[in-house]
Image (tube, rainbow, N blue to C red):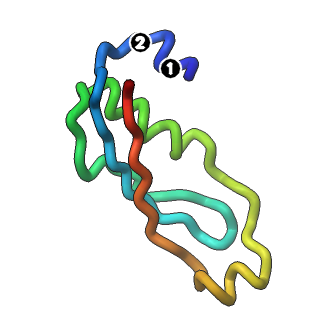
Amino acid sequence: YQEIEFFQPIDTAARVQVRFRIKADGTVDNVEAVRSTASKIATVICETAISKRSPFRPWTQEMVKVFGKERWLNVVFHYR
């Protein structure tokens, strides 16, 4: 939210889909917007919303059994 307030992108009704890989140790890599109807700055804000929070907590053994050692995820951000 701080980035949105600072840059004040005027992207209403925009959508950004971000794809990334998260590993069992909590690190994130290969963060990229794969679809966006938003401006460049609004798209970058969505990418950094994920990459700046890395690393996340490591996965439990049970999570590794279910997900493996890494997982590709897609997150969709909606600007209103």
> Residue at left 73%, top 71%?
59
Identify residue for label 2: 7
Front one among 5 and 80: 80
Dot 1, crowdedness within 10 Å: few (<14), some or many (≥20)? some
Task: Specify the quadrant that holds the N terminus.
Answer: top right
Image quarter where the C terminus lies is top left
The quarter holding residue 39 reads top left
Furthest residue toward bottom: 65
Answer left or right for 79 relative to 70. Answer: left
- Secondary structure under tag 2 reads helix
Q: How many marks?
A: 2
Where residue 18 appears, as percent x and y from the top left, is 37, 50
Residue 58 x %, y %: 74, 66
Q: Quadrant of residue 64?
A: bottom right
- Give the label on residue 37, or none: none
Position above or below: 39 against 67:
above
- Point 62% across, 43% down: residue: 53
**Is 49 left or right of 36, judged from the image as shown?**
right
- C-alpha gap between disc 2 and disc 1: 6 Å
Q: Can you say whether 9 is above or below 29 in the image?
A: above
Q: Is residue 29 above or below residue 7?
A: below
Q: Which residue is mark 1?
A: 3
Which amino acid type is marked by label 1?
Glu
Label 1 SS: helix
Give the residue drawn at x 48%, y 10%.
6
Identify the residue shown where x is 66% and y is 53%: 55
CB atoms at circles 2 and 1 under 8 Å apart?
A: yes
Q: Hey, what amino acid is under mark 2?
A: Phe
Q: Position of residue 40 (x, y in %)?
A: 25, 28
